Image: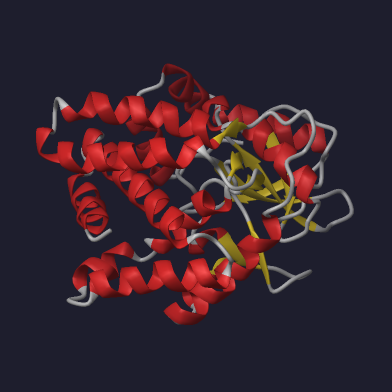
Amino acid sequence: MAFEPPSRLVNALGEVRDDGASEWLAGVGTLLDEAAARREVSVERVHVPGGRSSLVAHVRRADGSPAILKLAPERFRPEAERAALTHWDGFGAVRLLDEGINDGALLLERLHPEISVRTLPEAKALLEAAGTLRRLWVGPPEGRNCETVPERTGRQATAMRATVDAFPEVAPLVDAALEARESLVAAPPELRLLHGTFRQSKVLSGERMPWLVVGPDPVVGECAFDLARLVRDRVEDLIGSPSGPAITRRRVKKLAESLDVDQERLRGWTLFRAVESGVRALRVGRERDGENLLEFAGWL
């Protein structure tokens, strides 16, 4: 299938500065054709704008039923996603339809990508998103092939420290985020299989259930880590509101109480993840995103 990869994917992979990702992108059309043939599905169209780390195609199975074929470079751990989706088996998450094939592609049930909980009013969106996330917090599978929270955040901490040399003004926030991480990883309250990159746009409307989660980058750790990314959803709106700091503190409290998560641990992980994302955005030239995230982190 000849096509131009979605510009969103091209731009995002350009930021990672990884030769393997560039090589994957150059050959992704062939990879899509091969993955489709292997599963005996026909490609209808590539989803646009699509994601920042994967190519998503609408396909039809041999019996005519709709499905999604998703391909991602190895650096984005598609086989860890496969293992997590297999473990969840459709409970709260999109269902995997090709459990026996391990080639970096995933055949998934088709949801409604144009309808996410982000389309709901903010208060209801947070409630629905949090309730869906809770279903995913189960014990990790045996023989898991995904990272732990200390492993992932350890890599991120190294990159954060290295970035301070280029952006010395972020040093106080980086120091606070790293101090929070050290305290949090020392004594996690539980170990669960986590989504890893959860936010409102990852919760889509489905046929089996009203809302199902897509796009995990699974990690094993404490629930507060998973919930932290949800606290800053719609961060642009928060930054534009004079009540942004107060709204953020209320979100931390409300989400912690509704999902029985320690409020201070949620605040700490929210701080770390916001600073890490903000510093990373600065590093790849997305200055506005970085400044918004770091301003948000300062409220915590």
Q: Could you tell whether 29 is left or right of 139 in the image?
A: left
> In the rendered image, is residue 228 in sight?
yes
For image coordinates 63% across by 47% down, the residue present is: 190
Q: Quadrant of the N terminus?
A: top right
Return the residue nearer the eye: 157 or 110. 157
For image coordinates 37% across by 74% down, the residue present is: 250
Q: In x, y percent, where is residue 278?
A: 27, 45
Return the residue nearer the eye: 86 or 168. 168
- The quarter of the picture where residue 253 lies is bottom left
Q: Is residue 27 above or below residue 114?
A: above
- The quarter of the picture where residue 295 lies is bottom left
Q: Which residue is most to the right?
A: 63
Q: Could you tell whether 89 is left or right of 233 in the image?
A: right
Q: In x, y percent, where is residue 109?
A: 75, 55
Q: In x, y percent, where is residue 252?
A: 41, 66
Q: In x, y percent, where is residue 154?
A: 43, 28
Q: Is residue 233 above or below residue 53?
A: below
> In the rendered image, is residue 4 in sight?
no
Q: Quadrant of the C terminus?
A: bottom left
Q: Is residue 223 above or below residue 124?
A: above
Q: Which residue is most to the left?
A: 169
